[in-house]
Image (cartoon, rainbow, N blue to C red):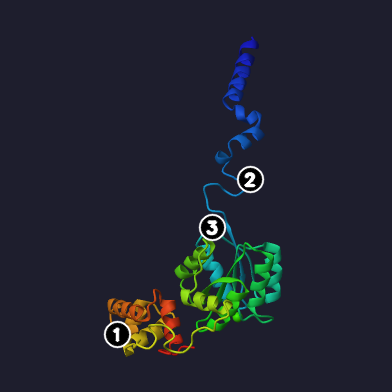
């Protein structure tokens, strides 16, 4: 009377165990099917980019918040600390060992260059990105010498900001090639060319008033549609002026164009 139901329960139990054999030895399962578990040896999710640890050092709290907000748009970035002084920056470099250091140069207690130098010496994997205002080329050169690999403008759009950081961590340097060249010459002990005519394009470059106006607006961070609106011309016309500027200055980007025009004394934005 009692036997049939008991046998039935036992069978049901046996069947349940048989269809889930890996449960008997979860450790073996973990090591034989790591991909199925979805985690690598360090606990990082597989089939996803490894998290990039970002340290923000900037004394302006609003800017810090803005950077963090822009970074939050990309789940592969993790802000590991966001601090407002150089001293805290130095400590966080040591503690958090970031992959990317976003660094302001004008900090209340020291130059951001100190933090760059410290990161460069103590956390070799850390890529340093200076976030600065336009017209700070001299400091940028000094920060590159200290180990910075790139620089962004403080008023960069979220798109440009993220693109710059991605370029940085993929081994690129979001820096004007012209600045890189100047830096190289400096390391080689040659003075950077400053007099007009030092480059083949120097003496003959003549920018129209429109082109100079566009360069000045570009240097202030306006995009093409904004420039068009300010100048009362279409974005398309702005683009065609920009192409002419690039050709005249023998450059390939807005940053290079502004830098080169400044260097040649064609515009004065510094
Ligand atoms: Ca500052």
Q: Mark 2 vs mark 3: which is more N-terminal?
A: 2
Using residue 164 as the reference point, say whether residue 242 is left or right of it: left
Q: Is residue 184 above or below residue 6?
A: below
The residue under the point 62% across, 48% down is 43
Q: Closer to us: mark 1 or mark 2? A: 2
In the rendered image, the quadrant that contains the N terminus is top right
**Quadrant of the image where one finds ligand 1:** bottom right
Decide if residue 8 is on the left or right side of residue 176.
right
Instruction: Identify the residue at horizontal 38%, vertical 88% (top origin).
Output: 203
Quadrant of the rendered image containing residue 57: bottom right
- Structural distance between the alpha carbons of marks 1 and 2: 59 Å
Pinpoint residue 58: horizontal percent, then vertical percent. 61, 75
Whether 45 is drawn above or below 112: the answer is: above
The residue most toward the front is 189
What number is the disc on residue 41? 2
Residue found at x 49% / y 66%: 162
Q: Is the CB of mark 3 within 8 Å of ligand 1?
A: no
Residue 208 in view in this figure: yes
Residue with the mark numbered 3: 76
User: Which mark, by number, is residue 232?
Assistant: 1
Is 182 in front, or is 166? 182
Task: Name the secondary structure under disc 3.
Answer: loop
Provide residue 70's location: percent of width, then percent of height: 51, 67
Q: Nearer the viewer, mark 2 or mark 3?
A: 2
């Amino acid at each position: 009377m009692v036997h049939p139901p008991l046998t039935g329960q036992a069978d049901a139990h046996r069947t349940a165990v048989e269809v889930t054999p890996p449960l008997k030895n979860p450790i073996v399962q973990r090591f034989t099917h790591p991909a199925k578990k979805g985690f690598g040896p360090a606990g990082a999710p597989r089939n996803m980019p490894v998290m990039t640890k970002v340290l923000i050092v900037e004394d302006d709290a609003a800017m810090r918040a803005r950077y963090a907000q822009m970074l939050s748009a990309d789940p592969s970035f993790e802000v590991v600390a966001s601090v407002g002084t150089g001293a805290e920056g130095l400590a966080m470099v040591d503690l958090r060992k970031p992959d990317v250091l976003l660094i302001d140069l004008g900090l209340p207690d020291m130059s951001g260059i100190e933090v760059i130098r410290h990161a460069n010496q103590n956390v070799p994997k850390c890529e340093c990105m200076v976030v600065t205002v336009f017209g700070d080329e001299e400091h940028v050169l000094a920060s590159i010498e200290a180990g910075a690999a790139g620089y962004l403008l403080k008023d960069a759009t979220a798109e440009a900001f993220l693109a710059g950081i991605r370029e940085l961590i993929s081994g690129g340097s979001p820096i004007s090639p012209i600045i890189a060249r100047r830096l190289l010459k400096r390391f080689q002990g040659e003075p950077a060319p400053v007099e007009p005519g030092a480059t083949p394009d120097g003496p003959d470059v003549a920018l129209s008033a429109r082109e100079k106006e566009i360069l000045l607006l570009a240097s202030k961070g306006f995009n093409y549609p904004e420039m068009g609106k300010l100048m009362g011309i279409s974005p398309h016309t702005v683009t065609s002026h920009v192409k002419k500027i690039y050709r005249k200055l023998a450059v390939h980007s807005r940053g290079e164009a502004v830098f080169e025009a400044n260097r040649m004394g064609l515009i004065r934005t510094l």
